[in-house]
């Protein structure tokens, strides 16, 4: 008896997290898994589920393009591709030129400079939820920290952070079964031209325009100012290019890290021995953060489009074929990870998981920043001896992100530890 | 310096300036602020095992061993 096929196009396949059994069957099968063409969704696609294959695709942008087709599994028209494009949708060398406008701010050494600001945000949010004693871990902790950090970097004032969280949430909702109405936020742009087909994307572009206007008059010490003044081949970014860049940074720096921080709370409750060990040996903090990212795989997949005849994982591919890299499957590849379903903060550093991408030109720009945010949150939780009792999580309705919308928690302190006085809110 | 040292180079067309190399071997790699790519300091020599680790951790595959075979098979990103 062959087991029931899962539909990878259907967000409901992911409504309780990663479908591990289905992915394990795909990894074990020879060749790549095929989702057939269908009338409603259009052309089918190949699923890449083994780590080595994800790495191969990621490192060969000439064969597996981010630019000639969409990077989500569904297809969009040519004019939409260019209207939405930011560096994540482009191939080298254009991609490389855009990326270098911002990459120096994200090197491992440079992000160390953000450490104390991140810690302050962590303390403030933990103070709040501790005083309340219980609450929604996502709203109180996992959402505000990453959005605060990326907004600071991009020069967005504090009073606008909540607005951007809301817009960013709605972008993801564009991948769900119940999207926003087309005229939400006064949108008048055709949905097909907008990222995630979401009206929230035009609201975010409008915000970027306003911010750009302000920063042109009063330049700040932030990445948006840097982008607005940078020149590529003697030309500045157009308003649309800036807006697309801004939207990518806010979305990529926010939604993903939030989701890792939400899963962190679930892992904390599910794997007390592993967390206890790291609380006593902080040299393992980096390994713990890395394991949380692998185990949660906040971005489930990205797609590439094939540009030439090639064979991948035993399957011959033709130009135009769609290849979907399931990071969430590759991160549990038995060939690469010993006992992949076990949660181990002390895994060897190589092979590296693919939750930040399989390497290559698009490898997550913010990986060092995300790691630092997670490490600071964990370190502060351990300093305080925090204990979390978690309720039932509600997952974001999406087959693209492994997000958690809400997670009720009760927070108290491990009584065996001396209580340290809370840092006051600053 | 030992017999097992190797020299490395960075392909600046490929480097995405993530700085993983600088983190692992700060004496050898440095992100050049003007060019925004990794550059190799001095003769770029370092122990073979460190070189292999850095090559393995470089997300873009920009680093190679000078005089080595062109493609060092990486076991992961
Ligand atoms: C745990 C948190 C995060 C995860 C799991 C994650 C995951 C990813 C993945 C899978 C990619 C695509 C890689 C590829 O196509 O090869 C990516 C790209 C990207 N990420 Fe992250 N990310 C995280 C945090 C961040 C943060 C904090 C930022 C802040 C700036 C960020 C900015 C970006 C950008 C700008 C790209 C596009 C890079 C390019 O196209 O060159 N990410 N991320
Ligand atoms: S690790 Fe690789 S991509 Fe990153 S800076 Fe060094 S050489 Fe460049």
Image (cartoon, coloured by chain):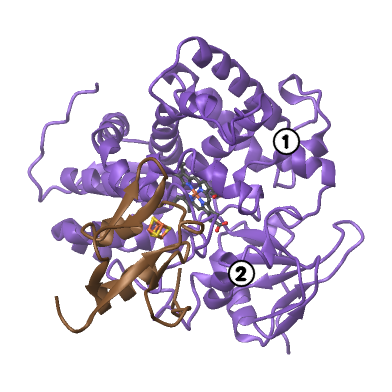
Ligand 1 lies under 8 Å from the Cβ of mark 2 = no
Do labels 2 and 1 touch, CB within 8 Å?
no
Q: Residue at x 45, y 17 (%)?
A: A159
Q: Quadrant of the C terminus of chain A?
A: top left
Q: Is residue A343 shown to the viewer in this render?
A: no
Residue B14 position in % (x across, y down) = 50, 59
Q: Quadrant of the N terminus of chain A?
A: bottom right
Looking at the rendered structure, whether the residues under marks 2 and 1 are on a common chain is answered as: yes
Furthest-top residue in view? A217
Q: How many marks?
A: 2
Chain letter, purple = A
Which is more toward the observer, A201 or A114?
A: A114
Ligand 1 lies under 8 Å from the Cβ of mark 1 = no
Chain letter, brown = B
Chain ID, mark 1: A
- Helix, strand or loop at disc 1? loop
In the image, A277: left or right of A187? left
Which is more toward the observer, A64 or B33?
A: B33
Which is in the foreground here, disc 2 or disc 1?
2
User: What is the crowding at mark 2: few (fewer than 14 residues within 10 Å), some, or many (at least 20)?
Assistant: many
> On the image, numbered disc 2 is attached to which residue?
A57
> On the image, numbered disc 1 is attached to which residue?
A198
Examine the rendered structure and indicate whether residue A92 appears above or below residue A330: above
- Helix, strand or loop at disc 2? helix
Q: Residue at x 22, y 62 (%)?
A: A284
In the image, A337: left or right of A126? right
Which is more toward the observer, A56 or A325?
A: A56
Q: Residue at x 69, y 57 (%)?
A: A12
Sequence order check: which comes first, mark 2 or mark 1? 2
């Amino acid at each position: 008896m062959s087991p029931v096929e899962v539909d990878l196009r259907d967000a409901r396949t992911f409504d309780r997290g990663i479908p591990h059994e289905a992915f394990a069957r795909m990894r074990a099968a020879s060749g790549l898994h095929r989702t057939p063409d269908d009338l409603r969704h259009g052309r089918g696609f190949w699923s890449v589920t083994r780590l080595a294959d994800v790495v191969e695709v990621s490192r060969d942008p000439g064969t597996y393009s981010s630019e000639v087709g969409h990077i989500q599994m569904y297809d969009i028209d040519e004019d939409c591709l260019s209207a939405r494009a930011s560096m994540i949708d482009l191939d080298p060398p254009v991609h490389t030129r855009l990326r270098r406008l911002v990459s120096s701010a994200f090197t491992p050494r440079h992000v160390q400079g953000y450490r104390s600001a991140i810690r302050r945000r962590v303390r403030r949010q933990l103070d709040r939820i501790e005083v309340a004693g219980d609450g929604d871990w996502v709203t109180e902790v996992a959402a505000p920290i990453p959005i605060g950090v990326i907004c600071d970097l991009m020069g967005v004032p504090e009073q606008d952070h909540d607005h951007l969280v809301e817009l960013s949430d709605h972008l993801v909702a564009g991948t769900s079964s119940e999207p926003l109405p087309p005229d939400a936020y006064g949108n008048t742009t055709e949905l097909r031209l907008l990222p995630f087909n979401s009206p929230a994307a035009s609201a975010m572009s409008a915000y970027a325009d306003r911010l750009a206007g302000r920063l042109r008059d009063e330049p700040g010490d932030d990445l948006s100012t840097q982008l607005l003044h940078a020149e590529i081949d003697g030309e500045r970014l157009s308003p649309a290019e800036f807006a697309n860049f801004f939207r990518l940074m806010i979305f990529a720096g926010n939604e993903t890290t939030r989701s890792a921080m939400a899963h962190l709370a679930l892992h904390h409750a599910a794997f007390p021995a592993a967390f206890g060990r790291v609380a006593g040996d902080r040299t393992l903090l980096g390994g713990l953060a890395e394991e949380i990212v692998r185990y949660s795989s906040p971005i489930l997949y990205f797609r590439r489009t094939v540009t030439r005849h090639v064979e991948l994982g035993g399957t011959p591919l033709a130009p135009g074929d769609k290849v979907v890299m399931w990071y969430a499957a590759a991160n549990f590849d038995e060939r690469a990870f010993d006992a992949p379903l076990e949660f181990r903060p002390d895994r060897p550093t190589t092979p590296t998981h693919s939750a930040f991408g399989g390497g290559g030109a698009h490898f997550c720009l913010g990986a060092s920043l995300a790691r630092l945010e997670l490490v600071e949150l964990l370190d502060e939780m351990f300093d305080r001896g925090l204990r979390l009792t978690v309720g039932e999580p509600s997952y974001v309705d999406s087959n693209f992100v492994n997000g958690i919308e809400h997670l009720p928690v009760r927070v108290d302190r491990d009584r065996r530890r001396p209580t340290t006085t809370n840092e006051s809110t600053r | 310096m030992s017999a097992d040292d190797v020299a490395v180079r960075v392909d600046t067309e490929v480097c995405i300036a993530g700085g993983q190399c600088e983190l692992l071997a700060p004496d050898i790699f440095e992100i050049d602020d003007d060019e925004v790519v990794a550059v190799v300091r001095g003769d770029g020599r370092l122990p073979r095992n460190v070189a292999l680790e850095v090559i393995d951790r470089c997300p873009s595959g920009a680093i190679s061993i000078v005089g080595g075979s062109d493609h060092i098979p990486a076991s992961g990103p």
